[in-house]
Amino acid sequence: MVVLHEEDENILSKILWTDESCFNNNGIVNRRNSHFWSKNNPHWTCETNTKIRWSINVWCGIFNNQLIGPYFYNGTLTGLRYLDFLVNILPDLMADVPDEVCDNVWFQQDGASPHNANVVKDHLNQQYPSQWLGTNGPVKWPPRSPYLTPLDFLLWGYLKDKVYEQQSKSLIYLKERITAACRTVTTTMSISVMDSSIIWRYEKCLDNYGGHFENLL
């Protein structure tokens, strides 16, 4: 990615960054990498109903500083379901992107098992020849790569902060809150990340020989 950026400084805006995340009614944002200091114990609490638990899986993308989605799907994502999404759903989500721009899109996905199904790889090779990033793609993507895409280090945490401000009482309400939170993602937020954070993170990852680099940020 660093080499691609050196060859084409606009490469980041040509990549459709994608990811899936699970939202649930008892959601709490994962704070394992954050530390909060206070002179007094804040006695933080979060009331949840652990006996009744339900969730929804969400796909989102970021392309050319714009949020694509959200798209909701129930149950477990399989290779065939993911292929159906790529063939029948994704084109509709990208309908507002001009054809001449779509023709030069790079596609990125992480190493989730459904992403590596042979039918998925065959489709990506045909749809994005030599221009997709994945575990088995023309541009190799690490099988475990936290905080290397704008969805990892920007979008999901931001959305869950918004969505989990209130506990959702129904699946419909949870979807509404996710959709409303997505509408608050501004172009300015995405531009600031695309302009600096991504390549900076990749360089720190390289500095640490592919190991954990969050402590260097």
Image (spheres, rainbow, N blue to C red):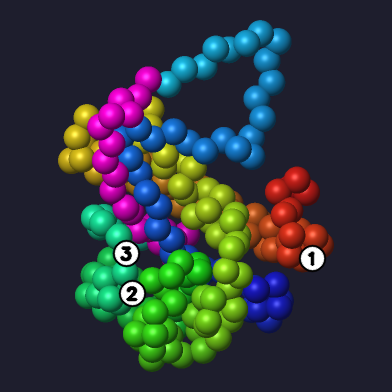
Can residue 145 be seen here? The reply is yes
Which residue bears the numbered disc 2? 79
- Residue 215 is situated, as x and y percent measured from the top left of the image, at 75, 45
Q: Is residue 104 magenta?
A: no
Residue that appears at 58% across and 73% down = 141
Which residue bears the numbered disc 1? 209
Q: Is residue 52 magenta?
A: yes
Q: Nearer the viewer, residue 157 or 169?
A: 169
Disc on res. 77? 3
Circle 2: residue type: Gly
- Residue 192 is situated, as x and y percent measured from the top left of the image, at 58, 51
Q: Is residue 152 above or below residue 81?
A: above
Circle 3: residue type: Leu
Check if mark 2's residue and mark 3's residue have beta carbons within 8 Å. no
Gap between marks 2 and 1 measured at Cα: 32 Å
Depth check, mark 2 against mark 1: the one in front is: 2
Residue that appears at 37% across and 20% down = 47
Q: Earlier in the sequence, mark 2 or mark 1?
A: 2
Depth check, mark 1 against mark 3: the one in front is: 3
Secondary structure under tag 2 reads helix
- Residue 90 is situated, as x and y percent measured from the top left of the image, at 29, 70
Secondary structure under tag 3 reads loop
Instruction: State which region is magenta.
Output: 47-67
Circle 1: residue type: Tyr
Q: Is residue 57 above or below residue 1?
A: above
Q: Residues within 10 Å of mark 3 (few under 14, many from 20)?
A: some
Gap between marks 2 and 3 measured at Cα: 7 Å
Gap between marks 1 and 3 measured at Cα: 32 Å
Residue that appears at 28% across and 36% down = 53
Can residue 69 be seen here? The reply is no
Residue that appears at 32% across and 64% down = 77
